[in-house]
Amino acid sequence: MDYRDALPELRQICIEELGERFGAQLAEHARPGFGLEPARKGRPATGRNYLGGPALLDPGTPWPDYLGIPLSPVAVLDTDPLASWLGEHLPVRPGLLNFFVFEPDLPPKEYPRDVDYDDPRWLRVIPADPARAAEVPAPAPARSFDRIPLHAKPVLTLPGHGDSAYRDFDWDTEIAAWPLIDQAEKHDHLAFGRPQWEQGPEPSWRDDHRHLLMVSPGKLGLDWSYFYFSVPAAAFRAGDFSQVVVGRVIH
């Protein structure tokens, strides 16, 4: 199934809730994505999508580091089983995407003092070929988390509060849309689509970026409540994941 098959129903819901003018305007900005939830009986894992666990890297790929300290793997996205739903919103076929952040398992006295979270090197997204990739465990002192296989549920996402898409709307559209947005299904983890900001977008989220992954590190035992990985649209179309940034929301 392609996301475009579900657009007429979403458009009708928006119009019923907001009226012809606002509803149609909001539905135009819908993007396909996937709600990610732990796999269980009746809700099987989708491909090799998981939180935590080892990285899946092509042979010979160096492990990413920051300040000479290895980064910690927080998720793997297996994009091949997601491609048919995303359609043109997945402009390249990156295969596997490995997500890393700087979160070493070090005692406070050994934790580096010069960590700069405005420096993009503290995170990394590394693609890999599904046919060649092998499991690589995190080297110490990177943190190693239990693998949580994920079920990917196709969803259509609408602009949430504070989304830059509202700059294209009539001012009243955002106000009118709040009740509908608040009723929308929420996900702890979201691949692609439009994330529902918990406290408004971080400065690292830019208008020309495309969302890759929202993950709740609390599920992994980390202090930050959410990571929002995004990439410039032009880099995404070129398959360049070296420009990924992360918005952090801390509760």
Image (cartoon, helix red, strand yellow):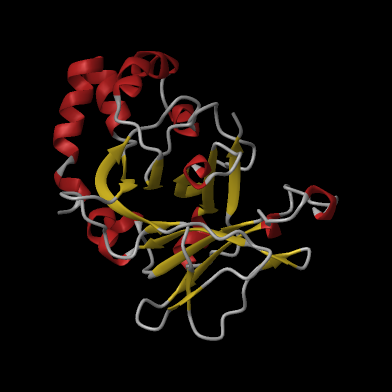
Residue at 40% over, 83% down: 132
Q: Nearer the viewer, residue 198 or 172?
A: 198
Residue at 31% over, 57% down: 88
- Please say whether residue 208 is visible from this viewpoint: no
Residue at 35% over, 32% down: 186
Percent x, y of residue 65: 69, 67
Q: Is residue 234 above or below residue 197?
A: below
Q: Nearer the viewer, residue 147 or 10?
A: 147
Q: Is residue 41 above or below residue 200?
A: below
The reply, left or right, for residue 43 in relation to residue 196 is: left
* Location of residue 155 (image quadrant): top left
* Location of residue 100 (image quadrant): bottom right
The reply, left or right, for residue 80 in relation to residue 124 is: left
In what quadrant of the picture does the C terminus appear? Answer: top right
Q: Is residue 12 above or below residue 91?
A: above
Q: Nearer the viewer, residue 213 or 138?
A: 138
Residue at 33% over, 47% down: 36
Percent x, y of residue 211: 46, 47
- Please say whether residue 76 is visible from this viewpoint: yes
Percent x, y of residue 92: 38, 67
In what quadrant of the picture does the N terminus appear? Answer: bottom left
